[in-house]
Image (cartoon, grey):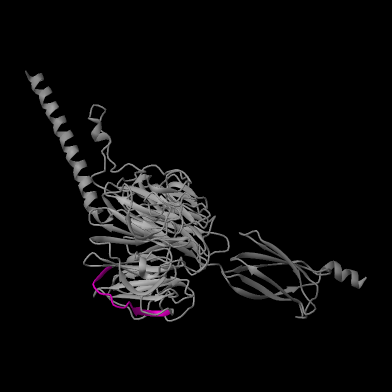
Amino acid sequence: MNKLFCFIQMQAQEFIFRISLYVLILFSLILTAIGTSSASVNPKVSAGSAHTIALKSDGTVWTWGYNGQGQLGDRTYTDKSTPVQVSKLSGLNKVIEIAGGRYLHTLALKSDGTVWAWGYNGSGQLGNNTYTDKNIPIQVSGLSDVLAVACGGNHSLALKSDGTVWAWGDNGSGQLGDGTTDVKTSPVQVNGLNGITAIACGIGHTLALKSDGTLWVWGWNEYGQLGDGTTSNKTSPVQVSKLSDVIAVAGGMEHSIALKSDGTVWTWGYNGQGQLGYETRGNTSTTPDQVLELSNVTVIACGGMHSLALKSDGTVWVWGENTQGQLGDGTTSNKTSPVQVSKLSDITAIAGGSSHSIALKSDGTVWTWGSNDSGQLGDGTNTDSTTPVQVNINLNQIEISTPTPTYTPIPTSTPTVIASPTPQPFPTITPLPTAIPSQTPTPGGSGMVYGFVYNADEESLKNVTVNIIGNNFSDSTTDEDGYYEFTGITEGDYTLTYEKSGYQTHTEDISIGEGEDMDMGTIIMETVEKGMIYGYVVNIKGNPLEYGRLKLKGISTKKTKQTSSDADGFFEFSDLDADTYIITAKKKGFKPVNQRIKLGDGEVTDIEIEMKKSSRRIAFVEH
């Protein structure tokens, strides 16, 4: 009886243990979901001229299509006909907004309000004070508290939480709105704008929507795309004529679209391909007119020379240029009034590239049509399509590269559902992948530390030795993008040191929690100021000795240099790193002299080397 009682008691205890463990796991997942609820975002699609961008609900960014300038952000310059993830080696996660440049660059907005850019940078549109292309995301300089981003042809735009608008890049037509036509490689504030709630870009013009429903524009205006009744460029914002109650805006290559609160669509600018959606308007219109055949519209978008509208019933309507099937109606003939895209329903978002179009369905699937010469349709081919094709991606699915959450495995008798819990109901953003670059984990922890190292000119530094010292010790070396990472880090306090020849050693102290992923951002290493040792070689009477031979050797650096004193006994050693040096002076008839000098970073030291005649030399003279 006692044995039976003990057996029952043991079974009960095991049952209670398992139930408790289930509850703990569920509670952990719920806490994770609560803690990252802001990270779960609405999926989005966008497009550049010939590349496509998609934002998944887990905050990761995926791209495909043309990649000649690195606009796909996957660390290559190779076109992709199927989706690839933008490199997380840059720390690009928790993204909430995306935008594709009308030419060759891409923008992403993170949940912390910072803006990241990659691709072509010939006009400074990446905003990092350089003109260097990047095939991996870099942070735009000096921007924070950003709510929205937009891309033009070669310029970029950001809307801050205070309602101000900031712009950078090409400015030949005044599209930056700062009153000049000068290129800017970092953000500048647009003149006189506040209370802005939405922004958009055409290829060379820019649009901003105010909270009062008025629309303001600036930049290129050759075809009346500013809608102010003129065809002259503007370097500061002007108001669009005869338009109010606007709730959304979009810009094409040379035309503009506005959506009013009553669900009507209004267009202006170039109409050579019918992109204004109003047949009798002629080739241009300098003020807005209504697209009469559209109503109940909730979303608008522009391609290069075609236009798109999403109606409240989930159908997509298009008009304008259709030479490559970008209208998706099964033909290649232009349309001067809206036609419905074939076989599409339950659409929640739309976007247009130069000659292709994108739609996102409520189930997370992405559909594309039109030009596909660079793989921008993402269907694994380079064949154009006049009707929508499905991309091999679902924006509602979450990417998982490391197990979450972590916990002690249940014995094999435990139901397998607990050993591999699906995190689908509780989306979390996955940290940086640990597979690239290869890094052997330090046993005992699950944390990660990662970041980039740049020089003062904001150029990536490769081959920087990075050490992490604390509960664990490990070292890493930065790759060609300046990236490094440490995995398997346990909870505790650490010191990171960054060392590279020719640069000042940099240190950072951090505290990391168990399982925490710490982004160190971009570490800037300053170059070491070079030092100099100079002086005179003299005899015991202080007279200069010419043509003395001098050799310098660094004790730590092992650097050696040689020189000779001139007719005045003067010599110098320049371009020296911090070190302790031995200078050996020799001259025929004089005793060799060794002199020790300690030199700091950038230090300049003058010395005098006194040489005595050798006894052999004196004996020879007396004889």
Q: Residue furthest right?
A: 623
Most foreground residue, 85 or 274: 274
Q: Is residue 1 left or right of residue 461?
A: left
Q: Which residue shows up at 63% across the image and 75% down it?
A: 605
Above or below 372: residue 579: below
Q: Is residue 513 left or right of residue 185?
A: left
Above or below 565: residue 21: above
**Quadrant including the C terminus:** bottom right
**Quadrant including the N terminus:** top left
Q: Position of residue 357 (x, y in %)?
A: 39, 54
Residue 116 appears in which quarter of the rendering? bottom left
Residue 595 appears in which quarter of the rendering? bottom right
Q: Residue furthest front?
A: 280
Query: Is residue 613 among what the camera can see?
Result: yes
Above or below 7: residue 507: below
Query: Is residue 96 among what the camera can see?
Result: no
Q: Residue furthest left?
A: 1
Q: Is residue 242 magenta?
A: yes
Most foreground residue, 504 or 412: 412
Most foreground residue, 125 or 152: 152
Tag count: 0
Q: Is residue 368 magenta?
A: no
Q: Position of residue 50 (x, y in %)?
A: 46, 56
Q: Which residues are magenta?
A: 234-247
